[in-house]
Amino acid sequence: MTEQVTRATFDEVMVPNYAPAAIIPVRGEGSRMWDSNDKEYVDFAGGIAVTAVGHSHPKLVEVMRDQADKFWHVANVMTNEPALRLAKKLTEKTFADRVFFCNSGGEANEAAFKLVRRHAYLNYGPEKHEIIAFNKSFHGRTLFTVSVGGQPKYKEGFEPTPQGISHCDYNDIEQLKALISDRTCAVVMEPIQGEGGIIPADLEFAKQVRELCDQYNALLVFDEVQSGVGRTGTLFAYEQLGVTPDVLTSAKALGNGFPVGAMLATESAAQSLGFGTHGSTYGGNPMACVIAEAVIDIIDTPEVLDGVKARHKLFVDGLTAINEKYSVFKDIRGMGLLIGAEVVDTYKGNAKVFLNAALEEGLLMLVAGPDVVRMAPSLIIPEADIAEGFARLDKAVAKVVANA
Ligand SMILES: *Cc1c(COP(=O)(O)O)cnc(C)c1O
């Protein structure tokens, strides 16, 4: 028998670590979703920068069904063809020589952070274990990744946390110079900070981070969990920074909603995770890998990637037009289809009011921290859906302003 469930069920049976909206989505198609009352929404959120080719994409449904009929799992004592094909594809299309698969962004980063520690341990000795990361950065919710992440609130009450990690301000090379030393094993950064407020790296800063890493024999880790897989208009954002990392992590859009993560590494970095040093039961499972391969095939084409750049302009124009009417944003920024609009001081700490108002008008959006409205739609969202979404946002913002 199927149990009857409602939003109230959440408050009864779920761990209270989330505060979900009042509505419950039940199906999606492209960039539209419907809730359990059959109300329709335009999707400017993409889950959370995840559904990069929209909901229930027919090609993804097809490859998933095909693989579901074959087999879902083998232990890592065997390999499987979908994993090998996906790894080949990722190494052919990037700087990387080798790939490790897992199930989420946090796990990809956990693998990366273990790798950089072990790489330094094997090549230089245990003294070289310090990791430098940036304030406001987000790298996941495991104990190691909240420790490397630059948002102290995520560590509070979970101490003792892993040690040997320090932080400095993003885009401030002098602070990094003051911290880095021969004890540094890695610098970890997002090419564009996502959860921290949609803050792109300055090109000159990124270049100098790479130079400092080389000078101190530290590995450079790019967390592209949010920025990767076409989100910024290139397959990975590092291509636009003109800086190549030693290790890169991917997840979110990689599975379009099916759980999959990947850590990509150069040959020499990868050699540090020798036989038996790390693993994951589900990592590289054939279901995830056929889907991720199809996602890459769909996204890594000139049409889709150029389309991201064209849509970037439509989103910036849409936000600018709303701002000319209502003056609610002090900055509109981002790369590709990862876009942030920072609210003016009247709404400081309260970007969420726009999210809630939009939801009522039938538009799904996100925030990035307390002050920034975030949009991370499907990379192939139809122009008509963009126009409809902004018409709904206009109504939502008008209501927020009227109630202020
Ligand atoms: C979402 C995110 C993560 C964490 O990914 P999970 O799949 O939630 O573990 C890590 N890094 C960045 C940059 C992210 O945006």
Image (cartoon, rainbow, N blue to C red):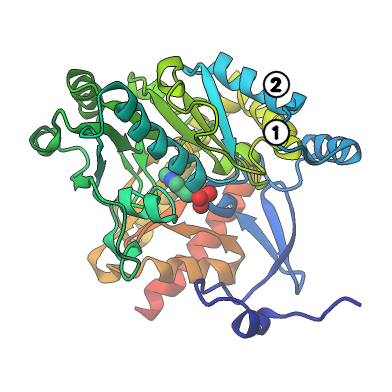
101 lies left or right of 286: left
Counting from the top left corner in percent of width and height, residue 360 is at: 58, 72
Q: What residue is disc 2 on?
A: 85
Does 55 appear above or below 20?
A: above
Circle 1 Cα neighbour tier, 10 Å, few/some/many (<14 / 14–19 / ≥20): many
Binning the other alpha carbons within 10 Å of mark 2 as few (below 14), some (14 to 19) or many (20 upward) gives: few
Q: Amino acid at mark 2?
A: Arg
Q: Is residue 368 above or below residue 65?
A: below
Q: Quadrant of residue 272?
A: top left
Q: Are marks 2 and 1 in contact (CB under 8 Å)?
A: yes
Which residue does the numbered mark 1 point to in the structure image? 289
Q: Is residue 397 above or below residue 271?
A: below
Res 317 seen here = no
**Residue drawn 41% across the image and 21% down it:** 239
Determine whether the beta carbon of the residue marked 1 sits less than 8 angstroms from the nearest atom of ligand 1: no
Query: At which x and y percent is residue 370?
Result: 33, 64
Residue at the (33%, 25%) spot, across then down = 122
Can you give x and y, in whole percent of width and height, for residue 84 in the image?
69, 22
Q: Tell me which residue sits at (64%, 81%) in the image.
A: 13
Kind of element beneath mark 2 = helix
Q: Is residue 116 above or below residue 42?
A: above
* The C terminus sits in image quarter: bottom left
Type of amino acid under label 1: Cys
Of 37 and 117, nearer the camera is 117
Quadrant containing the N terminus is bottom right
